[in-house]
Image (cartoon, helix red, strand yellow):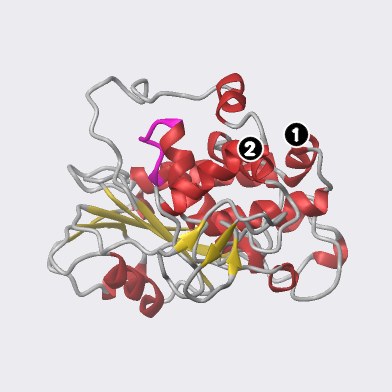
Amino acid sequence: MVSNKSRTGPGQSYRQGLSWKKLMKMFPDNSMAEQWFARQRWGDKPICPHCQSDNVQTGAKHPSMPYRCRKCRKRFSVRIGTVMQDTKLDYQTWAMAIYILNVGIKGTSSMKLHRDLDVTQKTAWYLAHRIREAWNYDLEAFNGPVEVDETYIGGLEKNKHEDKKLNAGRGTVGKTAVVGAKDRRTKRIRAKVVYDTTAETLTGFVYNASRQDAQIYTDDAKAYQALKRAAHATVKHSVKEYVDGEAHINGMESFWSLLKRGYYGTYHKMSPEHLQRYVNEFVGRHNIRGLDTVDQLEETAKGLFGKLITYRTLTRKSGTPTRT
């Protein structure tokens, strides 16, 4: 994972964007898109995904496998061993989808992908989830200062149909918790879906996300009282205190705000079984937002390699995906 570039421009104006016109010049046809993916994966010299040999014949006369390993004699393409494996979509479509998901800071629905890419909604839904796997990665523990906070994702009970209501109260009932941490120095974020907000769960997340000597900032939720860190300061949200010197969690709350704008304005629903994938999308996009758009596309493409995900894995049971 490449760190954000160090710039001196005001705000985010230093970033170099990429228009649709320039994008189509980058990927005028499927061949150019294929070459671009190959460069992101291997650089100048292809490596056999089966035996890791670099003794590879290129330009083999095969409709879908242009590489042939001279050592293990197997044919392969840039798709093998990636989330693109077994896809029927061409490379140009994949490149365009990566662009759309990167520039849509509030997310992009499968219905929009379906219209923009001229594919079915079902294909667009599967395509988007496979690209989200590019943002499924681990970060090293943060050095700090680190802000930690949790939020809840899900619809309001009062807005649900009668047969969907749990009739168990209000507030967080029927919602799924997500805990997150932000390193103020690097501005990186990591977030995880959790199924309870007990002291054991939240402190365990903090220990995993930050170094032992990192300064930690949280609110005054009871669960954080069990945090065994010498450098731990809180803000008392319970009495409407939101900033106390350096102690605040405004960075994490800003991220939650963006995630929820995506939830309410774009996806409308994030089912618990897929919520971590959507969280990964917003985290991954945030962590590379300081890069130029071209660099964002390259970082995302590199995250596709070495991962596999099937439609069966995503759906787990037969049925039509939700239109989100």
Q: Which residue is mark 2?
A: 96
Front-lying residue, 157 or 291: 291
What main secondary structure does the magenta stretch of the protein show?
A: loop
Give the spatial CA distance, label 1 vs label 2: 9 Å
Of all residues, the one furthest to the bottom in this rendering is 200
**Relative to 226, is 307 above or below?**
above
Count neighbours of disc 1 (C-alpha within 10 A) and say few if under 14, some if 14 to 19, many if 20 or more.
some
**Relative to 58, is 186 above or below?**
above
- Is 62 on the left or on the right of 292, as rendered? right
Label 1 element class: helix
- Is 146 on the left or on the right of 258, as rendered? left
Task: Identify which residue is drawn at 40% across, 42% down.
Answer: 288
Q: Which residue is mark 1?
A: 116
Front-lying residue, 67 or 52: 67
Which one is earlier in the sequence, the residue at label 1 or at label 2? 2
Which numbered dot is residue 17? none
Front-lying residue, 158 or 182: 182
Instruction: Give the magenta part as a residue range.
Output: 287-293
Tell me the amino acid under the disc marked 2.
Met
Task: Identify which residue is drawn at 73% across, 53% down.
Answer: 125
